[in-house]
Image: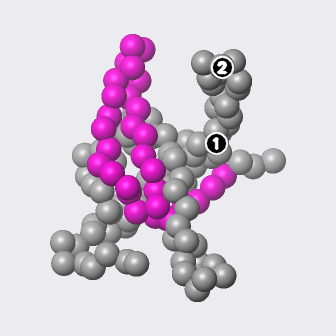
């Protein structure tokens, strides 16, 4: 079986790389990915997908990409969980990036998409 996803979207914010106690580096990013079809109101909706980047991929993406840039991500889905203060368990799905491709920078003159 294979766990692989390929996504293309815009970065919703600039990335920050953090160094963990064990020396590994991590960045977290969210991709805004417009759907390819219109909803019942005739509008395109956007999905927001969280991604984790590690070590060299994290450093390079944080250095060369900024909010609004279009990137491609190849990675795998991973489920994480944590316990809330009330004792309930929360599960969330994340994409762990194995490769990030820089596709284009957002032009300063480019209009915002409605």
3 above or below 45? above
Read off the magenta span.
Answer: 4-33
Q: Give residue 67's position: percent from left, percent from top.
A: 30, 56
Q: Residue furthest top?
A: 21
Q: Is residue 112 left or right of residue 57?
A: left
Q: Residue furthest bottom?
A: 42
Residue 44 in view, yes or no: yes
Label 1: how many residues lie within 10 Å, few (<14), some (14-19) or many (20+)?
few
Colouring mode (rainbow / by chain / secondary structure / one colour): one colour
The one nearer the camera, 99 or 109, is 109
Image quadrant of residue 92?
top right
Kindly report which numbered mark, 1 or 2, lies closer to the viewer in this rendering.
2
Which secondary structure lies at badge 2?
A: loop
Magenta stretch mostly in which secondary structure?
strand
Q: Residue furthest left?
A: 108
56 above or below 104? above
Residue corresponding to mark 1: 93
Q: Give residue 114's position: percent from left, percent from top.
A: 40, 78
Residue in the picture at 66% in, 82% down: 40
How many numbered marks appear? 2
72 above or below 58? below
Residue in the picture at 57% in, 46% down: 95
Q: Is residue 108 left or right of residue 92?
A: left
Q: Residue furthest front?
A: 86
Verify whether residue 25 appears in magenta. Answer: yes
Q: Earlier in the sequence, mark 1 or mark 2?
A: 2
Image quadrant of residue 79?
top right
Residue corresponding to mark 2: 86
Alpha carbon distance from label 1 to label 2: 21 Å
Q: Give residue 7's position: percent from left, percent from top.
A: 54, 61
Asked if the residue under mark 2 is in contact with the one under mark 1, i.e. CB atoms within 8 Å, the reply is no
């Amino acid at each position: 079986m294979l766990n692989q996803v390929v996504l293309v979207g815009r970065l919703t914010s600039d990335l920050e790389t953090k160094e963990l106690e064990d020396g590994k580096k991590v960045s977290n990013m969210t991709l805004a990915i417009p759907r390819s079809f219109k909803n019942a109101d005739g509008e395109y909706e956007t999905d927001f997908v969280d991604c984790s980047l590690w070590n060299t991929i994290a450093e390079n993406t944080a250095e060369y990409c900024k909010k609004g840039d279009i990137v491609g991500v190849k990675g795998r889905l991973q489920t994480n969980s944590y316990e809330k203060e009330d004792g309930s368990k929360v599960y969330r799905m994340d994409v762990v990036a194995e490769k990030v491709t820089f596709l284009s920078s957002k032009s300063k003159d480019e209009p915002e998409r409605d």
